[in-house]
Image (tube, grey):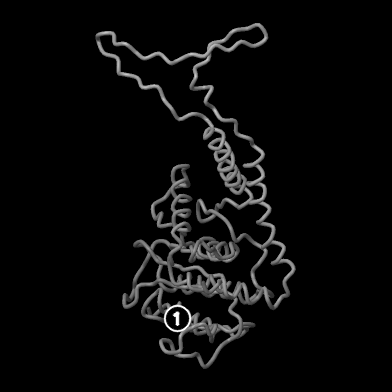
Amino acid sequence: MRGLEVSLWLICVGWSIWSKDIIFVVTEDSIAGPQAWVDAYHDTHSSELVENLSIKGGALQGALCLDYPAGTAGHRYDKLHVVYDGINGQLPNLDLFNTAVSIASGRIGISCVIQRMFNRGDSYSDRLETIFRGMLSQGLGHASGPHSSFIPYHIDAVTLQTVGDGWHDEMDLGRVVESTFRSLNNLLEHLHQSFFFYLLIGSKRFVSIGTYLPSAMLVAVNFAISSIALWVRSGKSTKKTSKVASTMAAERIEKPKMEVIEHNGQIALIPKEQLATEERHLLLPLTFIGISHLLGLIPFYLFNHFSEEVCAINLFCLSQT
């Protein structure tokens, strides 16, 4: 860890031109520790369990978490595993992820992997497995790393894990941290122009929401069509004619009773079971589905006509639940 400590010391002392404060947080537990600290930083913690913070540095711009094996002097690694999944499927701004990957792979020469695909290639099956792992992680919604505690507070964060056995050392990791801090230091405002909803198929390839959202909408439309189809089918008779399985010897099969229908001089034989069908009007289900969709406009209208103070309180309460 000596090389990493020297590199971090150079970040704070060797280069003095900083427009933002840098806060180092060292915890024993990788999940509970950052969660307790970020809660205390925003005064949402329990004072009986967590001590109050006496010094703060203002609004947090971003967070870069490191998962490096402590106590292993001279530890060398091969790749960086970038963890980005947050709690309840929340994701950091894609610009922060791209910045960390571009610095590590472009400037330092460290290969970056995601979703624990350490030996992945660039084939179709590898990309498909990567995107499925990302969807599963987002669907479960659990904390995947120390960075997950920051995302609910609208703080973009990722975790860098060293994996493999290669020739990169802690000095290279320190250079990645320094360059990423420099990138965040040059920001004039909070990250907001990039993607927040995306599916990564690799460290340098992603699927945006504009690509997969139409598919999700078509799946949702199928639910409405299936419900209308079930409504129509519910009017049909559920009585079924019993049939005996045929064997080598011919068995007598009960014939359905027929009804003679005459219309416009034409005669037709129709089973009586079909005559038991009850007519189903489509106006009722279509009206019900239309009203259900229109009810979604109520929260949309309220959120766009509330005052800024009320909206801030509501968003704060939602982030705590």
What amino acid type is highlighted by mark number 1? Ala
Q: Nearer the viewer, residue 272 or 317?
A: 272
Where residue 110 sits in the image (x, y, percent)?
Answer: 46, 62
Q: Is residue 78 above or below residue 47?
A: above
For numbered disc 1, what is the local secondary structure? helix
Taking the spot 25% from the left edge, 8% from the top edge, the residue there is 249
Q: Is residue 281 above or below residue 167?
A: above
Q: Is residue 208 visible?
A: yes
Where residue 10 sits in the image (x, y, percent)?
Answer: 51, 82
- Residue topped by disc 1: 36
Taking the spot 38% from the left edge, 63% from the top edge, the residue there is 163
Taking the spot 50% from the left edge, 61% from the top edge, the residue there is 89
Local packing at callout 1 (Cα closer than 10 Å; few below 14, some 14-19, many 20+) is some
Q: Is residue 138 above or below residue 64?
A: above
Asked where in the image residue 264 lies, by quadrant, the reply is top right
Where residue 283 sits in the image (x, y, percent)?
Answer: 67, 39
Q: Nearer the viewer, residue 94 or 39?
A: 39
Where residue 107 sits in the image (x, y, percent)?
Answer: 54, 64
Q: Nearer the viewer, residue 225 or 283?
A: 283
Q: Is residue 12 above or below residue 66?
A: below
Taking the spot 50% from the left edge, 68% from the top edge, the residue there is 158
Quick check: 247 left or right of 303? Answer: left
